[in-house]
Image (cartoon, grey):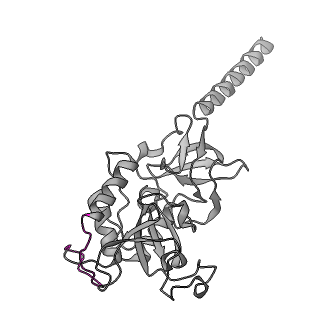
Amino acid sequence: MKKQLTALLLATTVTFSVGALTAEQAHAASSATIVSGVNFRKAPNTDSATYGLLKTGVKVDILDKVNNYWYKVRDDQGRVGYISTSSKYVRTDGSGGSTSNGGGTSNSGGSSNAGSTSNGGSTSKPSTGSNSEIVNKVIAAGQKYLGTPYEFGSDRSNTSTFDCSDFTRQAFKEGAGITLPSDSRGQAAYVKSLGGTTTNWRNLKPGDLMFFMDYKGTKASTYPSDKSNQRISHVGIYLGDEKILHTYSKTSGGVRIDSIAGKHWEYRFVFGGSALK
């Protein structure tokens, strides 16, 4: 009888262990592929330290969907961290992992910090339309203001004049339904927080924001080769075809389109990237 009881207890233990394993397998990671370089953070917020950038083509396992902004993932080196859920950066090959807290705000504060800045920028993405459609709307909204006079420190409450950041802010507000920070440095910080930026303007896509350092002349030799620590002083919208839509002075005629290649715009360029999640 004692032997039978022992056998029964052993069978129950094995059954429980198998059940626990099955439950864990039910939450097994789904695979995903990085489609554009993205920051691999140690915590689900933009203030967190990073392991670095996960490059295009890297495979990751999605362990969990923390909220609408962050995936918890494991990379091919076995490191566990957090990346943006945006389809611009990651393509899921499965269900995308389970969702903590019903996809809402996690205790780690991910949803409030995933892309926000201290300068009043909104990180909400429009609920309808693909990124390409939204980009077209942003560009169309910007081009509607061609010729609008330039005014440094323009009034953000009207569209009678623009400075560079007021113009880009208005284009994204009308075309994408998001409100960017009110100055170029704030917009640069916001775009950088989303990851996937580039220091080569030829890698930009239409609709990306371009950020520039101060003007130092028309020759490339007057600009430093390493601009990573340069202060951002100008922003514009990349149109594709080596063109930029922006505004920068009263004498230039206000909002206009300029060529980039071989111009001081190319030499002043610091980095650029998308403001869309």
Q: Where does the image place residue 1, in percent across and percent down from the top left?
A: 77, 10
Image quarter where the C terminus lies is bottom left
Give the percent coordinates (x, y) of residue 209: 43, 66
Single out the residue that lies furthest toward the right: 3
Choose between 98 and 30: the one closer to the eye.
Answer: 30
| Residue 170 left/right relative to 236 | left
Magenta: main secondary structure equals loop
Is residue 55 inside the magenta stretch? Answer: no
Q: Residue at x 60, y 66 (%)?
A: 49
192 versus 5 height, above or below: below
Left or right: 262 with respect to 8? left
Q: Is residue 106 left or right of residue 24?
A: left
Q: Give the magenta-colored segment's residue range.
A: 144-159
* Residue 194 shows in this picture: yes
Question: Measuring 42% from the left and 42% from the top, which residue is drawn there?
Answer: 102
The location of residue 10, given as percent across then percent down, is: 75, 21
x 64%, y 80%: residue: 225
Could you tell me how many numbered marks the image carries? Answer: 0
Q: Is residue 277 above or below residue 202?
A: above
- Residue 116 in percent (x, y) is at 41, 65
